[in-house]
Amino acid sequence: MTDCAARFDIDAYIAALPRRALSAPRPNAATRYRVWNYALLKDYQGFTGTERRRASQLGNWLLAAGCLTLPERCEICASPGSTQMHGENYYDVPSDPALCRACHRALHLRFWQWDAWRRIVDASAITGQEWFALMPQHSIDIAGHLRDTWGWCAADIERSPIAPLPDAIAVMLPGNMLPHPVV
């Protein structure tokens, strides 16, 4: 582990992620999760492609069911318009930041274009304690940290001990989520 990685406070970073309130689902909420036929995404922050797909299924269902609403401004640069969820903690979908396309792209390119990313952070951060301002240049193993803390039950996002879903939502969840090889 590098000295930089040893100094990084992963719990402070996770706590700094935005938190969105969840509402009860609409009565006509879909009874099936969306299923994609394209290849799984690469691992990111310790989360596997399967875990990322599962979080996408849950996040898209929460949005479509009216349980989750995205802000109309980017949570980094505050630009108005369409936002998209960015998964940082795939075990806690309501903590996914909502980003404009430009900030989302820059965030993913930060490993290779750190100076460009830091220009966005410097222009957007107010206190320096925002989640995106705390983000290190190196990859962090959020998933491994959460599994070390909570065990593999952390990966069961429909019954998460990290971010339990309200009963009104939990009872309506579809039963066709992509299976996880461990949970």
Image (cartoon, helix red, strand yellow):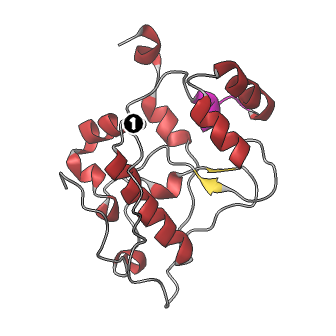
Rendered location of residue 4, percent (x, y): 47, 13
Judge whether residue 163 can be spotted in this image. Answer: no
| Bounds of the magenta segment | 127-134
- Quadrant where the image shows the N terminus: top left
Rendered location of residue 183, percent (x, y): 19, 56
Rendered location of residue 2, percent (x, y): 40, 10
Residue at the far left in the pictured view: 182
Residue at the far front in the pictured view: 38
Magenta-drawn stretch contains 118: no
Relative to residue 28, is residue 103 drawn left or right?
right
Residue at the far bottom in the pictured view: 27
**SS category of the residue bearing label 1:** helix
Q: Is residue 31 above or below residue 13?
A: below
Judge whether residue 84 can be spotted in this image. Answer: yes
Residue at image position (44%, 45%) is: 89
Counting other residues with Cα less than 10 Å from the Cα at mark 1, is it few (<14), some (14-19), or many (20 or more)?
Answer: many
Question: How many labels sit on residues?
Answer: 1
Residue 103, located in which quarter of the rendered image? top right
Rendered location of residue 41, percent (x, y): 42, 46
Amino acid type of the residue that numbered disc 1 sits on in the rendered structure: Ile
Relative to residue 173, is residue 84 drawn left or right?
right
| Residue designated by label 1 | 142
Relative to residue 174, is residue 30 drawn left or right?
right
